[in-house]
Image (cartoon, grey):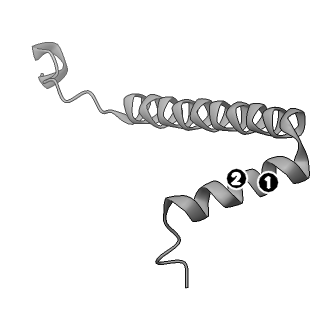
Amino acid sequence: MLNNIGLPGILLIAVVVLVLFGRGKISSLMGEVGKGITAFKRGVDDSKKELEDEVVDAAVDVTPDSEQDKA
């Protein structure tokens, strides 16, 4: 159904949305979308850091014991 929408169709939709909501409402909406994307990226980075910290904490020291411990 939307396979042949093309550039004119997208422009028509953009104009209709602009007329319905107005420039101010659309710009504030895009600002909120930007804040949401930033928060999502921050959350992903924090999750990666937490996982890396857990891996480092769970790492086992595999160096051989000193000779005193062997005797």
Q: Is residue 45 left or right of residue 60?
A: right
Quarter of the image for residue 25 reads top right
Q: Is residue 29 left or right of residue 62?
A: right
What mark, if any, has residue 14 been given in the picture? Answer: 2
Task: Determine crowd level at label 1: few under 14, some 14-19, many 20+ residues with C-alpha closer than 10 A.
Answer: few
Q: Looking at the picture, how far across and down is residue 18, in whole percent?
A: 80, 47
At label 1, which amino acid type do we have? Val
* Residue annotated with mark 1: 17
Q: Looking at the picture, how far across and down is residue 1, in whole percent?
A: 55, 85
At label 2, which amino acid type do we have? Ala
Q: Is residue 61 left or right of residue 39?
A: left
Residue placed at 57% from the left, 30% from the top?
A: 46
Closest to the observer, 37 or 68: 37
Closest to the observer, 71 or 50: 50
Which structural element holds mark 1?
A: helix
Q: Looking at the picture, how far across and down is residue 10, in whole percent?
A: 59, 59
Question: 54 above or below 8?
Answer: above
Which structural element holds mark 2?
A: helix
Question: 26 above or below 15?
Answer: above
Residues tagged 1 and 2 counted as in contact (Cβ below 8 A): yes
Quarter of the image with the C terminus in it: top left
Closest to the observer, 23 or 35: 23
How far apart, in angstroms, are the residues tagged by discs 1 and 2? Answer: 5 Å
Residue placed at 16% from the left, 21% from the top?
A: 65
Q: Looking at the picture, how far across and down is residue 49, in whole percent?
A: 49, 29
